[in-house]
């Protein structure tokens, strides 16, 4: 599975003009001898029938009209493509999987889209003693390749079609994160095409090794967000503390089997008081059980608090079946969530409709881990529909919901003038081993939260944009009314998630807190990210609406 032909220039012996200097690989345009034989991707202009498909992503609110889309098939190809765009003075954006919630890739200022979706290799690099993942690889393909090849995985997200490139750069998390931390907690190295002050494009490899002179470039990609510093052409993963040379010992071992529960809470059984109790039960449990050494760290839950038009609220919960007392821990969790609510959970019919009916909500189903990962990742077409328009707003919660916040959610989720079933507040378990890492160890600074939230709604018609964006703004601003309409970092909140970007937080009309948007996403790590930006992108070539400012 090692792609030696594509990476021959990494040896430093097969290319004229390529050199490894203190860990920094320089591959300058025009192409070196090795680069001349490297795969090259297509250049797609408006006359090409593929153009329409490649000028937007999964959120159809955002469309670009670039001069061309350049498909990238190798690192030398990326170096050449960046150099061409810089030499011609064209505005660049970078895409891996196309799942960006905002306009970072597709907007009316972009003149060249560099598309990395054809860089999809996953394998093991014995020289670095680490697994490599290319940015265009979709998460499900990453999980399949790592697990089938070596029995290992990374604790990444549930959406199967997300590209690894942006997911990793923003931090990355998923159902295994409470047990194993964020994806970037296992990131060992990164290869990035950057542009120096003289306007020369080159490929740089940076590792987490303390003596690596390029270490800050690695650090910037541990949660600093995509499209900020350059074009990532490869990631390498090795878990901290990994020993020996056996590949299967270098990364997290995936569970063999998991216990899963998928239930629904019918809206017709809920009134305001029951709804409030249900949400506060969720928050209270996470407040009690989010320490890194909690026996519940291997348990993670995804709770879709859907609008009343959907008919029910859905919750998917998973725990490693090999954990001592796994069934008991899962049973305790489910009982804690429903305590005093007076609602009878039903076997899930949606969004996890493929899961066979559960005879009792507290009796989980035992599934092979990869099967469970496919199940939760592929069985929610709402969030992966490539024809939808959407709006998304995020928050990290350090404390439980207040009664006022839960009532706000109830009111907006039951509005009489709102009938969109594809509307939800997603609550995702957090804490555990995520919170065992210091806030400055990676660029992802949120290391004290107990759960994460994403407010989102989807619709097909551009004529309805104002209505649905207005709904999202209303619920978000009222929920965070005491902190200026945004989750200002403090005792209760820990800001926002850069992989769920929201341009509103940079607009005083929607953020009246007086807290600048970079502090919401990066907290105290922003000055260090700015330093990395000044070194690695001094001309600010790689920029977007919420990019790090030099």
Image: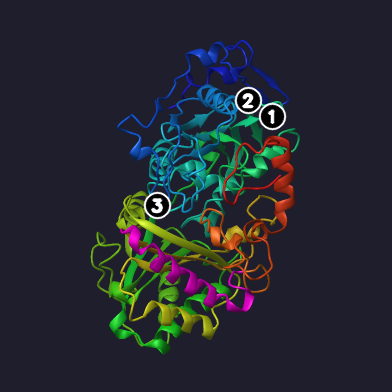
Residue with the mark numbered 2: 202
Kind of element beneath mark 1: loop
Would residue 396 be counted in the magenta stretch? no
Image point 65% across, 48% down: which residue? 548
Of residues 230 and 485, which is closer to you in this image? 485
Residue 320 in sight in this render: no
Q: Residues within 10 Å of mark 1 (few under 14, many from 20)?
A: some
Residue 241 left/right relative to 403: right
Q: Does residue 410 lie above or below 213 as drawn? A: below
Q: Does residue 521 lie above or below 191 as drawn? A: below
Reading the chain from its start, which is encountered first: label 1 or label 3? 3
Residue with the mark numbered 1: 196
Q: Predominant secondary structure in magenta?
A: helix
Discs 2, 1 touching: Cβ within 8 Å: yes
Kind of element beneath mark 2: strand
Residue 264 left/right relative to 66: left
Discs 1, 3 touching: Cβ within 8 Å: no
The residue segment tinted magenta is: 460-487
Kind of element beneath mark 3: loop
Q: CA distance from mark 3 to mark 2?
A: 32 Å
Image point 37% across, 68% down: which residue? 423
Reading the chain from its start, which is encountered first: label 2 or label 1? 1
Of residues 366 and 237, which is closer to you in this image? 237
């Amino acid at each position: 599975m090692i792609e030696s032909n594509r990476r021959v220039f990494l040896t430093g012996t097969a290319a004229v003009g390529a050199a490894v200097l203190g860990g920094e690989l320089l591959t300058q345009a025009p192409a070196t001898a090795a680069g001349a034989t490297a795969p090259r991707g297509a250049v797609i202009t408006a006359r090409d029938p593929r153009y329409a498909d490649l000028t937007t992503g999964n959120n159809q609110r955002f469309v670009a009209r670039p001069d061309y889309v350049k498909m990238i098939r190798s690192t030398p190809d990326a170096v050449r493509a960046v150099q061409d765009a810089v030499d011609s003075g064209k505005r660049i954006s970078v895409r891996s999987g196309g799942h960006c919630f905002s306009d970072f890739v597709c907007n009316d200022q972009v003149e060249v889209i560099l598309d990395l979706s054809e860089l999809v290799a996953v394998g093991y690099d014995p020289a670095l003693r680490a697994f490599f993942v290319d940015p265009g690889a979709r998460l499900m393909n990453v999980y399949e390749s790592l697990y089938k090849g070596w029995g290992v995985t990374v604790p990444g997200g549930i959406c199967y079609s997300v590209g690894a490139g942006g997911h990793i750069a923003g931090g990355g998390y998923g159902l295994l994160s409470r047990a194993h931390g964020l994806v970037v907690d296992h990131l060992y190295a990164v290869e990035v095409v950057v542009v120096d002050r003289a306007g020369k494009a080159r490929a740089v490899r940076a590792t987490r090794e303390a003596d690596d002179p390029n270490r800050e470039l690695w650090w910037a990609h541990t949660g600093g967000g995509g499209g900020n510093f350059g074009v990532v052409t490869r990631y390498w993963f090795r878990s901290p503390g990994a020993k020996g040379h056996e590949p299967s010992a270098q990364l997290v071992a995936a569970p063999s089997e998991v216990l899963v529960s998928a239930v629904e809470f019918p809206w017709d059984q809920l009134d305001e008081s029951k709804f409030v109790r249900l949400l506060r039960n969720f928050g209270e449990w996470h407040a009690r059980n989010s320490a890194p050494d909690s026996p519940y760290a291997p348990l993670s839950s995804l709770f879709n608090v859907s609008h009343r038009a959907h008919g029910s609220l859905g919750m998917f919960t998973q725990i490693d079946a090999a954990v001592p007392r796994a069934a008991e821990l899962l049973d305790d969790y489910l009982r804690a969530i429903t305590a005093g609510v007076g609602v009878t959970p039903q076997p899930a019919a949606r969004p996890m409709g493929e899961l066979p009916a559960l005879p009792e909500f507290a009796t989980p189903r035992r599934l092979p881990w990869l099967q469970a990962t496919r199940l939760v990742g592929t069985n929610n077409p709402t969030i992966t529909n490539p024809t939808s328009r959407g709006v998304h707003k995020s928050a990290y919660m350090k404390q439980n919901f207040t009664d006022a916040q839960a009532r706000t959610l109830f009111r907006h989720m039951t509005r009489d003038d709102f009938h969109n079933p594809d509307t939800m507040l997603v609550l995702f378990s957090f804490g555990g081993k995520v919170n065992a890492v210091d806030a400055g160890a990676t660029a992802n600074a949120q290391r004290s939260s107990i759960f994460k939230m994403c407010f989102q709604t989807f619709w097909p018609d551009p004529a309805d944009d104002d209505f649905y964006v207005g709904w999202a703004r209303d619920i978000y601003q009222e929920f965070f009314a005491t902190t200026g309409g945004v989750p200002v970092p403090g005792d209760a909140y820990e800001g926002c998630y850069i992989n769920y970007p929201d341009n509103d937080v940079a607009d005083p009309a929607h953020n009246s807190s007086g807290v600048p948007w970079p502090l919401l996403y990066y907290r105290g790590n922003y000055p260090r990210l700015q330093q990395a930006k000044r070194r690695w992108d001094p001309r600010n070539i790689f920029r977007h609406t919420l990019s790090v400012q030099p």
